[in-house]
Amino acid sequence: MKLNPTVAGVTTARIQPENQRGGAPGARTKPGKTNTEPVVSIDSIMSRRVVTVGFDDTLATAKSIFDEAKFHHLLVVEHGELHGVVSDRDLLRAISPFIGSTVESARDVNTLNKRVHQIMSRKPITLRPEAEIADAVELLLAHKISCIPIVDEQFRPVGIVSWRDILRALASQNPAAGQAAGT
């Protein structure tokens, strides 16, 4: 796999699509392997529910989204193109720990007025939908990240894959692991 910088400043892994050879939806086989060893594509496990924010949205906006939702990453999009990622941990590091407490001050509340572009991770590592789970695992480990935005040819987000999605997919392939994980 080769990482290529792009005009938009987003780094994406260029994965050449392989021939479909039947099997489960999203499953392919590697060249030289039989149909009994499917390779699952990112497209089949990615979350298609992508929530985005803009560069100039406030941290208060991001906080309210995280407070209401059950996910940990927001994609930063401008003119339809992906430019960054904000995690719930990025947000917690950027705002005052005293917000919502009895000792909260105006200075603490003002940390919510910062803009998303001030704390986002820029030039996110991305994959295309036809990439394999192994490609995602390699990127997650190599770059010490917890999610990978999935983009189309114009770098528009079409999904997101987290390490939890990968674990769920692997657990579903192994019934004993799935029961232990509560799936």
Image (tube, rainbow, N blue to C red):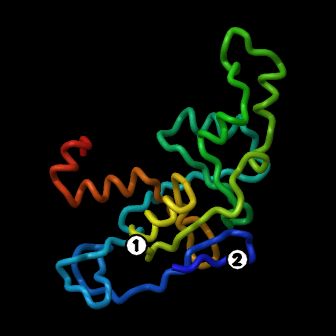
Distance Cα–Cα, label 2 vs label 1: 21 Å
Ranked by sequence position, the earlier of labels 2 and 1 is 2
Label 1, secondary structure: give it: loop
Q: How many marks?
A: 2
Q: Which residue of the protein is positioned furthest toward the front in this rendering?
A: 142
Q: Position of residue 37 (x, y in %)?
A: 22, 77
Cβ–Cβ under 8 Å for marks 2 and 1: no
Give the SS element for disc 2: loop
| Residue 173 x %, y % | 22, 60
Dividing the picture into quadrants, the one containing residue 76 is bottom right
Query: Eyeballing the image, is 81 above or below 61?
Result: below
- Judge the density around disc 2: few (<14), some (14-19), many (≥20) Cα neighbours within 10 Å: few
Please state if 69 lies on the left or on the right of 164 as rendered: right
Under mark 1, the amino acid is: Glu
Q: Position of residue 97 (x, y in %)?
A: 68, 23
Q: Nearer the viewer, residue 39 or 68?
A: 39
Q: Is residue 12 shown above or below 111?
A: below
**Which residue is drawn at the image coordinates 47% and 40% (left, top)?**
70
- Above or below, 67 relative to 82: above
Q: Which residue is mark 1?
A: 132
The location of residue 78, given as percent across then percent down, is 73, 61
Q: Residue at x 71, y 58 (%)?
A: 122
Residue shown at 76% from the left, 53% from the top: 55
Residue marked by disc 2 = 6
In the rendered structure, which amino acid carries the disc numbered 2? Thr
> For the point 53% across and 62% down, which residue is it?
142
Crowd tier of the residue under label 1, counting other residues whose Cα lies within 10 Å: few below 14, some 14–19, many 20 or above: many
The label shown at residue 43 is: none
